[in-house]
């Protein structure tokens, strides 16, 4: 079996999704999406339910046709090809094993459709069963298998066809926690062994972080960010990602001035400092700080600090989570290892963080104000009655 | 005993609940069946009254060539009816199961609406279409395709047509139910694994909906052995089915014992068919319309 290419090495694109839109009636489900999936990579498509990730997957597999844009597989346009004409296989969320066929017939189905000789089918089914560690289950029927076993049969049934891309639609969501963790490791090593591109759809951010080479985060039909797990965690590009991937504390702030690489920010709970990133004056941003990066002191510290009161301390086994309420009522979460000191419940303290630990997230919130400024209120006043005209003039 | 609390609180309410049903079943189904079984072993006297003397003559008469001929004809009609019903009902049920709820309701109404009219009246209406001076013959003569009217009524084909027309819904409904229960992702999985629609139908859809076809076949096959009014209206005298000879024995011939023997034979055939059905994995419950 081939090995995974070195990171940074020459990667060949295998699936190219260009400006793809999908409408269901009036619903815009996938919005102008661009994504390139490379050979032999493990790409996760992550997002909350209803974000369009399953639709995107169905577009790649060919169960749905996109409204506009193009999807290329190995440089070839696939717009009008049916699923059975694409060299892509899918592992379905509910496994979709054929209930009237034995494990052997289920796995052999794809080869049978391709008219592979029977003797060869026999050998390859056996190999596939060994691959998913289900030797001796040939004669069983799906109803006689456990969830994890069905999962393995579904995977064997897909990989036996040597697809260019294997699509997995939340394949582990029906399994219990322990089995899921075990299957995560198995899937990852299977992908390395086979050298097939895996497109893995999930709503579980932990699963995505643990398994993927890259993660594509989708929200509301838009691809927010596609990057390595570390990159996504450390430098989320949108507020949604910061909030969705791991735990974080978000502070909404207005940029007041910037000097010598430091941005002076105004936030409801107090003034903050941040890394300067050439903001516009009055730009509205979010400052995202992970709970493990927040520091505290009993007295205000030089630079900036936000005062608050310790509300609660929660023991979580490996960490202690401290909940602090700031002066404006905002709740801040702080995580500390169990053996390090944590603040007393009820005590007043000041939180701060190192500038490098905070991620500045751009928003488009200030655009609303820009647009408001450009509205010609006089024309509005003329068209409406006098009272409304007075009110808008006061604004 | 009658005053014990268990009797008062459990047994009496239970009895009062099931008694009406039990009484109905015993009086109107079990007893008449037993009576028919008994008189099938009796004979008639000159005044056409039943004389209660044990004899196997009625069953011996079943081997009569005329009777065997009618049984054979009846079975051929039933088999043809069932096959034609499957061929018509399957695509109809398939579309019905997969279309929008509105269209499904519409199709269901079209399927059921004729049943609001008496089936004998509906069958007579076929005469105006198929008769010697019916609309179809008139039309074919008019466009010059034929020189003389074709005999369409009073043929075996007409009886089969009438049977299909009367029994089609009983085939559509069970098939539609099984298609509706079919998981879409199985069809997608089949396509994903390289099967086009025809092969997906052959290997996935058809085997998984076979129970519906089977249940529908039972519900069409068995009544079509006995619906004598269909063969009366559509087949005239030459195309009799089992139901016809039974009804004639009870009415015109006044030979109840022989009619009973014929009925018992029909019940035996029915039981054999149902037994084949359950033996091959069918469930009795699925014969009820769901």
Image: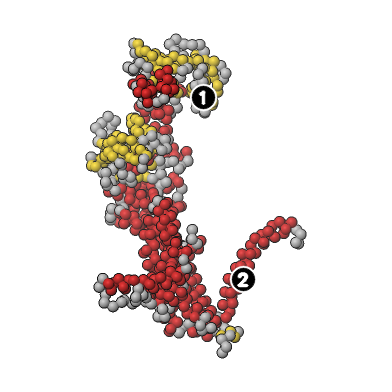
Q: Which residue is mark 2?
A: B27
Give the residue at x 58% y 71%: B29
Q: Which residue is mark 1?
A: A320
Q: Are marks 2 and 1 in contact (CB under 8 Å)?
A: no
Q: Residues within 10 Å of mark 1 (few under 14, many from 20)?
A: some
Give the residue at x 30% y 41%: A67
Q: Which image quadrant: the N terminus of chain A?
A: top left
Give the residue at x 57% y 18%: A346
Q: Quadrant of residue A293?
A: top left
Residue B40 point in image, percent of width and height: 55, 80
Looking at the picture, does residue B41 appear above or below residue A209? below
Subunit ID for the residue under disc 2: B
Residue B63 point in image, percent of width and height: 46, 83
Q: Residues within 10 Å of mark 2 (few under 14, many from 20)?
A: few
Q: Secondary structure at mark 1?
A: strand
Q: Quadrant of residue B214?
A: bottom left
Residue B216 point in image, percent of width and height: 44, 64
Q: Report the Cα–Cα distance between label 2 and label 1.
A: 77 Å
Left or right of A356, for residue B246: right
| Residue B82 seen in the figure | no
Q: Which image quadrant: the C terminus of chain A?
A: top left
Residue nearer the viewer, A227 or A260? A260
Looking at the picture, does residue B201 appear above or below residue B42? above
Subunit ID for the residue under disc 1: A
Same-chain check, marks 2 and 1: no
Give the residue at x 31% y 77%: B149
| Residue B168 seen in the figure | yes
Q: Specify the farthest residue to the top.
A: A302
- Scheme of colours in the image: secondary structure
């Amino acid at each position: 079996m081939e090995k995974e290419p070195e990171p940074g090495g020459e990667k060949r694109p295998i699936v190219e999704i260009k400006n793809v839109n999908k409408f269901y009636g009036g619903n815009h489900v996938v919005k102008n999406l661009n994504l390139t999936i490379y050979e032999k990579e493990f790409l996760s498509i992550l997002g909350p339910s209803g974000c369009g990730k399953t639709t995107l997957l169905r577009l790649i597999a060919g169960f749905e046709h996109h409204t506009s844009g193009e999807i290329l597989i190995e440089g070839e346009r696939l717009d009008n090809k049916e699923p059975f004409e694409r060299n892509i296989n899918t592992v379905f969320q509910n496994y979709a094993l054929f209930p009237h066929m034995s494990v052997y017939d289920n796995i052999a189905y794809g080869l049978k459709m391709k008219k592979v000789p029977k003797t060869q089918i026999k050998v390859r089914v056996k190999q596939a069963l060994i691959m998913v560690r289900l030797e001796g289950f040939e004669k069983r029927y799906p109803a006689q298998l456990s969830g994890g076993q069905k999962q393995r049969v579904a995977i064997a049934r897909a990989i036996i066809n040597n697809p260019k891309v294997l699509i997995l639609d939340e394949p582990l969501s029906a399994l219990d926690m322990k089995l899921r963790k075990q299957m995560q490791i198995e899937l990852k090593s299977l992908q390395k062994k086979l050298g097939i591109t895996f497109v893995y759809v999930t709503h579980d951010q932990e699963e995505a972080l643990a398994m993927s080479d890259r993660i594509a985060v989708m929200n509301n039909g838009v691809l927010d960010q596609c990057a390595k797990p570390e990159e996504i965690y450390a430098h989320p590009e949108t507020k949604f990602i910061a909030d969705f991937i791991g735990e974080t504390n978000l502070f909404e702030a207005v940029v007041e001035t910037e000097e010598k690489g430091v941005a002076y920010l105004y936030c409801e709970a107090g003034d903050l400092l941040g890394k300067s990133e050439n903001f516009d004056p009055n730009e509205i941003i979010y400052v995202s700080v992970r709970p493990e990066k927040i520091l505290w002191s009993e007295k205000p510290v030089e630079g900036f600090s936000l005062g608050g009161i310790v509300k609660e301390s929660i023991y979580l086994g490996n960490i202690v989570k401290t909940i602090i309420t700031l002066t404006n009522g905002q709740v801040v979460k702080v995580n500390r290892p169990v053996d390090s000191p944590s603040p007393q419940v009820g005590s007043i303290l000041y939180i701060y963080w190192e500038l490098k630990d905070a991620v500045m997230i751009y928003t488009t919130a200030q655009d609303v104000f820009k647009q408001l400024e450009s509205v010609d209120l006089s024309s509005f006043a003329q068209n409406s009655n006098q009272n409304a005209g007075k009110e808008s003039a006061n604004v | 005993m009658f005053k014990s609390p268990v009797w008062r609180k459990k047994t009496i309410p239970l009895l009062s609940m099931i008694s009406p049903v039990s009484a109905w079943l015993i009086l109107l189904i079990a007893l008449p069946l037993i009576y028919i079984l008994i008189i099938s072993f009796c004979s008639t006297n000159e005044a056409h009254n039943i004389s209660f003397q044990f004899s196997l003559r009625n069953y011996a008469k079943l081997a009569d060539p005329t009777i065997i001929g009618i049984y054979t004809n009846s079975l051929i009609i039933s088999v043809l009816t069932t096959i034609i019903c499957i061929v018509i009902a399957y695509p109809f049920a398939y579309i019905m199961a997969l279309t929008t709820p509105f269209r499904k309701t519409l199709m269901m109404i079209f399927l059921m609406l004729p049943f609001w009219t008496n089936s004998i009246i509906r069958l007579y209406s076929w005469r105006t279409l198929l008769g010697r001076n019916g609309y179809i013959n008139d039309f074919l003569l008019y466009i010059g395709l034929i020189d003389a009217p074709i005999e369409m009524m009073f043929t075996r084909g007409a009886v089969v047509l009438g049977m299909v027309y009367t029994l089609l819904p009983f085939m559509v409904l069970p098939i539609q139910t099984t298609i509706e229960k079919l998981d879409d992702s199985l069809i997608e999985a089949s396509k994903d694994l390289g099967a086009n629609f025809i092969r997906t139908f052959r290997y996935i859809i058809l085997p998984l909906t076979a129970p519906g076809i089977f249940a529908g076949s039972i519900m069409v096959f068995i009544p079509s052995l006995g619906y004598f009014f269909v063969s009366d209206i559509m087949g005239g005298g030459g195309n009799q089915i089992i139901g016809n000879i039974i009804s004639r024995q009870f009415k015109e011939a006044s030979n109840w014992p022989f009619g009973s023997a014929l009925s018992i034979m029909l019940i035996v055939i029915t039981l054999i068919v149902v037994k084949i059905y359950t033996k091959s994995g069918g469930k009795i419950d699925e014969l009820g319309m769901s």
